[in-house]
Image (tube, helix red, strand yellow):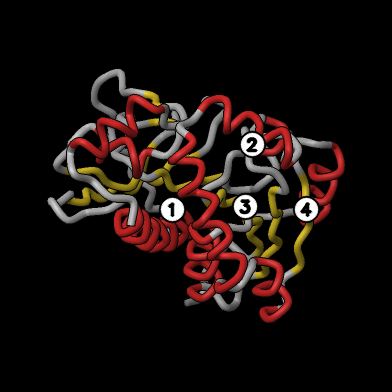
Amino acid sequence: MSLKKIKKIVLVAHDNEGSARLFNRVTSNFPDVEFLLVIGESLYYKKSFLASVIKLLREASWLFVFVRFIELVKYKIIGKTLKKECLDKGIRYICTRDINAPEALESIRAYAPDLLISLFTMQIYKASVIGIPRYGAITSHPSILPKYRGLEVFFWVLANDEKETGVSVFFLNEKIDAGKVFEQEVVPITAGTTVASLYKTITDIGGDLLVKAVIDIDNDEVHYIGSEGEGSYYPMPDRASVRRFLRLGRKFF
């Protein structure tokens, strides 16, 4: 579909299945838009891959880390990496550990984007990058904000035996998952819902909401959704939460 004002979009992603799904959903819906992809090279913000793995092993359940490792290996072997997607689609990409690093900022400024879209990343955005795109920077988060801000909320809603979750699209600011929400959709959780099935469902809905968000921004039809309550924040799943998850009969796959 054609847009009236938005002609250049910066996408920021990690090279994993979720980011790839969102990348394909956005790029396929706007064939007339020029894209620049910024690929995060580490699991954690600014850390090397090895430092990210060490931090993950210290903070999270080893079972959870093993599951995530299997998913990443499967994606790398079977999936189509973002670099290959870019080559096939003629999209330029750059790589960085830090979206706020001088070289990344220089590349984004030179590109002069109309919009920035963050695709399931662990990057922490500063005002220096948020202020570059003409119409702002947006992202999708896999929960009904302000509830379940933070990490791996696909897992946490199941470990906490929630009956529903959802997706929120909001404008980025310097606080984590705390910008103004303007697109949202509730997703029911059933007895057979697994982390993998919820991840796929929410990622696909998140892609659709991002497409709708771009169109609404382009048409000046953004309507903010008021947040209720103080919200909650979750870190990487620890051993106690994984044990609770398993006792509830939940499964990863």
Query: Dot 3 surroundings within 10 Å: few (below 14), some, or many (20 or more)?
Result: many
Left or right: 226 as drawn, with respect to 52: left
What is the spatial separation of the Cα atoms under label 2 and label 4, in whole angstroms?
14 Å
Which amino acid type is shown beneath numbered disc 1?
Asp
Tell me which label, 4 or 1, sits earlier in the chain: 4
Location of the C terminus (image quadrant): bottom left
What is the spatial separation of the Cα atoms under label 4 and label 1, in whole angstroms?
32 Å
- Mark 1 or 2: in front is 2
Q: Residue furthest top?
A: 230
Tell me which label, 2 or 4, sits earlier in the chain: 2
Q: Which residue is mark 3?
A: 14
Residue pictured at 23% horizontal, 32% vertical: 160
Which amino acid type is shown beneath numbered disc 4?
Cys
Q: Residue furthest bottom?
A: 88
Q: Nearer the viewer, residue 20 or 42?
A: 42
Residue 216 image offset from top left, x and y in percent: 41, 57
- Mark 1 or 3: in front is 3
What is the spatial separation of the Cα atoms under label 3 and label 4, in whole angstroms?
10 Å
Instruction: Give the structural element (helix, strand or loop) at label 3.
Output: strand
Q: Which residue is mark 4?
A: 95
Residue pictured at 76% horizontal, 38% vertical: 48
What is the spatial separation of the Cα atoms under label 1 and label 3, in whole angstroms?
29 Å
CB atoms of marks 2 and 3 within 8 Å: no
Residue pictured at 53% horizontal, 37% vertical: 172
Query: Dot 4 surroundings within 10 Å: few (below 14), some, or many (20 or more)?
Result: some
Which amino acid type is shown beneath numbered disc 2?
Tyr
Q: Which residue is mark 2?
A: 44
